[in-house]
Amino acid sequence: MWFRPEVLQSVNWAGNPNKPVEVDQNGDHHLSPRQSFAKWQETVKLTSLPWKACEIEAALELRSTIVGVILKKADELAKINIELARSNSELDAFAYIASHDLKEPLRGIHNYSSFLIEDYAHLLNEDGVSKLQTLVRLTRRMEDLIDSLLHFSRLGRIELLLKNNDLNEVVNGVIDILRINWKTIPVEINRPQPLPEALCDRIQINELFSNLISNSVKYNEREPRQLEIGYYQPGELFTDLQGHTQVLAPDAPRVYYIKDNGIGIKERHLDKIFRIFKRLHGPAKYGGGTGAGLTIAKKIVERHGGTIWVESIYGEGSVFYFTLASWRQGDERPII
Ligand code: ADP
C-alpha cells in the first residue's frame, strides 16, 4: 500500500541547476555568471508523484485504527484469560467440594449394603443376594471414581515444589514399586540412555511416570511386554512410529517417551483417552481402572509447562511423549 510507482516527469529549470563550479589554474573555485538564460529541461526518474495531504491523513487514520483494534483485542484476551483462570479454579474447588461431600453418603450406602449381605443374605434367594452384591460392587466403583476426581482436583490446587530431580532415579523407584504388582508378568524394559536431570515436582513426576509405565504393561497382552523409556534432545533425530525421521528443532524442549508393544489405540480414540473417566474398555477389562490416569498425567505435564501426546498403531503398540517445558506459544507440539 505504501509504495507508489515511478512517474517520469519533465522539469523545466531557468538554467542547469548542476552547473559545475569553475576551477582556475591555482585550484581555486569560482562561481561565474550564467552565460545562457535558455530554459534547461530535465527528466526526473525513479521518483513518484508527491503524496497528497488527504493520502497522508488516510494513512495516519488507518494506523490509529489498526492500533485501536489490536489494543481492543489484547484487552479482550486479557479479560478472557482472567475469566478462564477464575472459572478453572472455581471448577477445581467445585470438584473438590462435591467429591469430598459425596463420599460420606456413599460410604453409608456401601456399609449398609455390606451389612445387609452379612446379616440377611440367608433370608434372600440367589437373585436377591446377587443384586446386593452388585450394589456393593457399584458403590465401590463410584468410590474409586470420586477418589480419582478428588485427586485430580487436588492436583490443580497443590503448589508445585520445583527442584532439579534425577529422572533416572525417579523411574527406577517407579519400576521397583510396579514390579511388586506385576508379579509374574514378564516385562522387559529397554532404556537406551540414562534419563537426565529435570526441574520438576518429584511427587508429581513420579505419578506421571507411574501412570504411563503401568498403562504400557496393563494394556498389553504380549509375552514379554516390551517397554522403551528414553528421551530426545533438541537438535536430535526423532523417529515416529510410522518410521518417519525428522530433526527435533534446536529450540524445542526435550521430548521424553514411553513406548510399548501393547494393544495400541485406534486413531479415532487418540484424542479421547485424555478425557476424565474415558476408558476404551469395560470397567473390569485389562485390570480395571477409573479412566482418570491419563487426565491426571496431562494435568501434571501442563502444570510443568509441557505437553503430552500419543502415537499408536492399533494392535502393534503406542508411544506416549511428553515435555516438561513450554515452547513458543501457539505451537501444539515441539517443531520437528
Ligand atoms: P485407566 O487406565 O484408569 O482406564 P487411563 O486414563 O490411564 O485410565 O487410560 C484411558 C484409556 O486409554 C484406557 O482405558 C485405555 O483404553 C487407553 N490406554 C492408556 N494407555 C494405553 C496404552 N499404553 N496402550 C493402549 N491403550 C492405552
Image: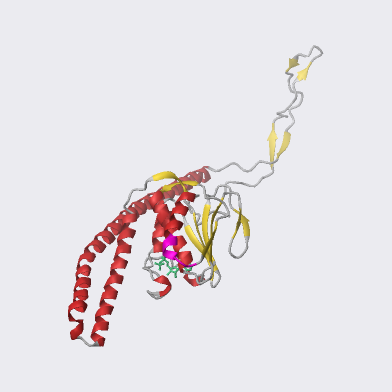
Does 234 appear in magenta?
no
The quadrant holding residue 22 is top right
Left or right of 187 in this view: 299: left
Q: Locate residue 101 relative to residue 49 in the image: left or right.
A: left
- 335 w.r.t. 142: above or below: above
The image shows residue 40, relative to residue 194, as above or below, that is above
Tell which of 311 and 189 is nearer to you: 189
Q: Is residue 242 left or right of residue 288?
A: right
Counting from the top left corner in percent of width and height, residue 263 is at: 51, 71
Q: Residue sitting at 39 percent across and 76 percent down?
A: 282
Residue at figure coordinates x 37%, y 46% from the top left: 161
The image quadrant in which ligand 1 is located: bottom left
Q: Residue furthest top?
A: 26
Examine the rendering and report whether any part of residue 300 can be seen. Answer: yes
Going by the picture, which residue comes out furthest to the front? 184
Give above or below for 332 relative to 317: above
* Residue 184 painted magenta: yes
* Above or below, 241 relative to 305: below
Q: Position of residue 131 (x, y in %)?
A: 26, 82
Instruction: Say which of 267 and 35 sits in front.
Output: 267
* Residue 98 coordinates in the image, percent (x, y): 24, 63
**Residue drawn at (27%, 59%), measured in percent from left and top?**
96
**Residue situated in front as seen by the camera: 326 or 316:** 316
Instruction: For residue 302, say whether it is visible.
Output: no
Query: Dominant secondary structure of the magenta stretch?
Result: helix
Q: How many discs mark residues in the rendered view?
A: 0
The quadrant of the picture occupied by the C terminus is: bottom right
Question: Percent x, y for residue 16?
Answer: 73, 29
- Over which residues does the magenta segment extend? 178-185
Figure quadrant of residue 296: bottom left
